[in-house]
Image (tube, helix red, strand yellow):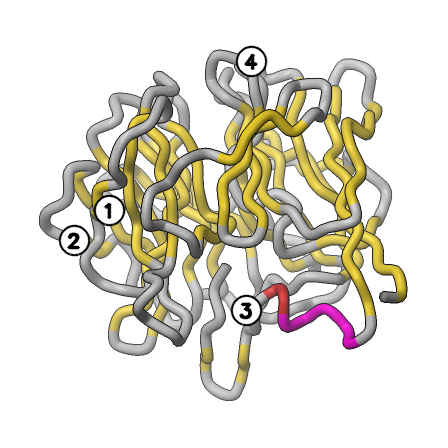
């Protein structure tokens, strides 16, 4: 979740985009590629976001109201994870490939204005460890061997893709084009980092080698394309497309659809009809271990 200013463009927090006098209703969906159909796992009269499917296939993580919550595959809320002093967790979170480490993007309680630092902690409990000392930093991916993380960060007024050791250390800048580069995620073989970029004047999916070289455009249409999440078998990716051009923003409460990108042919096919979503729908990796199903969130509004 990135409240940034690029030129005259302000990208607000999702909560600031909810119309006055309205309440959010959130629905967690499971999409099956074989059946080509979605199933609603749960609908709740509150705002939750960004599902992760655990690598062992046994549970789901969501964020809501600054907390990380654990759900069953049936859509039952099981527990709120103990994240220690981190009480401003946002929708950029996820698990290592072995499922042992949880990565969290969170503000600090003592900082009143928006901030975001990246932390790691054992999924079974423990004290969160800060990885990135600079803010804002938003986690989006971890290498298959667990050694490195990739993230979006604003440094000197521009959002770019960065890499750092999962234990902290030197920050390595991987992109430098004018405009927003966001949503970096490793391919399961560790060869590529996929990301979305505004470098052509339209938000599109790109990829580069894991060292930041050989950048290659993957989508070319008129939608605003965000957050390519690579399936575990490394053949395709699910992405979210805004129907209307959002320039460099990915706001809540817009008409969107989910689409499948073939990583070999670059062909893109629609998976879902248009729905009310955007920020929070599918910000982070949400595939099942087999790469046949994934999770996402849709929204609706009702009067308070």
Q: Nearer the viewer, residue 179 or 99?
A: 99
Viewed as shown, does residue 20 lie left or right of 61?
right
The residue beneath circle 1 is 163
Gap in angstroms between the C-alphas marked 3 and 1: 22 Å
Which numbered disc, 2 or 4, marks the residue that appears first in the sequence?
Answer: 4
Q: Nearer the viewer, residue 263 or 142?
A: 142
Task: Judge whether 249 appears above or below 39 on screen.
Answer: below
Q: Which residues are magenta?
A: 16-20
- Percent across and percent down for residue 57 are 54, 13
Pair 4/3: label in front: 4
Crowd tier of the residue under label 3, counting other residues whose Cα lies within 10 Å: few below 14, some 14–19, many 20 or above: many
Q: Examine the image and state in which quarter residue 158 appears.
A: bottom left
* SS for dot 2: loop
Gap in angstroms between the C-alphas marked 2 and 3: 24 Å
- Percent across and percent down for residue 296 are 68, 37
Specify whether residue 40 is in view.
Answer: yes
The residue beneath circle 4 is 58
Pair 1/4: label in front: 4
Residue in the image at 77% along x and 73% along y: 19
- Percent across and percent down for residue 287 are 57, 25
Residue in the image at 64% along x and 59% along y: 224
* SS for dot 4: loop
The residue beneath circle 2 is 171
Residue ranking furthest to the bottom:
8
Viewed as shown, does residue 286 lie left or right of 299?
left
Which numbered disc, 4 or 3, marks the residue that appears first in the sequence?
Answer: 4
On residue 248, which mark appears?
3
Please report contact status of discs 2 and 1: CB closer than 8 Å, yes or no: yes
* SS for dot 3: loop
On residue 134, which mark appears?
none
Pair 2/4: label in front: 4
């Amino acid at each position: 979740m990135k409240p940034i200013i690029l030129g005259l463009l302000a990208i607000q927090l999702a909560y600031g985009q909810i119309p006055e006098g309205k309440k959010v209703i959130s629905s967690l969906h499971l999409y099956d590629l074989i059946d080509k159909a979605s199933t609603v796992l749960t609908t709740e009269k509150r705002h939750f976001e960004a599902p992760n499917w655990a690598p062992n296939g046994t549970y789901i993580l969501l964020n809501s109201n600054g907390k990380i919550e654990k759900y069953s595959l049936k859509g039952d809320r099981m527990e709120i994870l103990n994240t220690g002093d981190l009480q401003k967790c946002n929708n950029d979170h996820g698990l290592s490939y072995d499922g042992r480490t949880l990565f969290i993007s969170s503000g600090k309680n003592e900082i009143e204005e928006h901030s975001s630092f990246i932390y790691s902690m054992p999924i079974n409990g423990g004290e969160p460890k800060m990885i990135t000392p600079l803010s804002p930093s938003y986690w989006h991916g971890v290498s298959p061997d667990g050694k490195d993380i990739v993230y979006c960060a604003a440094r000197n007024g521009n959002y770019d893709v960065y890499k750092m050791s999962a234990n902290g250390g030197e920050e390595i800048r991987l992109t430098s084009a004018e405009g927003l580069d966001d949503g970096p995620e490793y391919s399961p073989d560790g060869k590529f980092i996929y990301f979305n970029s505004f470098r052509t004047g339209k938000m599109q999916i790109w990829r580069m080698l894991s060292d930041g070289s050989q950048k290659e455009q993957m989508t070319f249409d008129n939608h605003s394309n965000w957050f390519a999440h690579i399936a575990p078998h490394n053949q395709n990716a699910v992405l979210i497309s805004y129907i209307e051009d959002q320039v460099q923003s990915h706001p809540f409460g817009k008409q969107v659809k989910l689409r499948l990108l073939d990583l070999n042919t670059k062909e893109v096919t629609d998976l879902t009809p248009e729905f009310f979503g955007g920020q929070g729908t599918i910000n982070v990796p949400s595939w099942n271990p087999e790469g046949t199903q994934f999770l996402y969130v849709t929204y609706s509004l009702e009067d308070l």
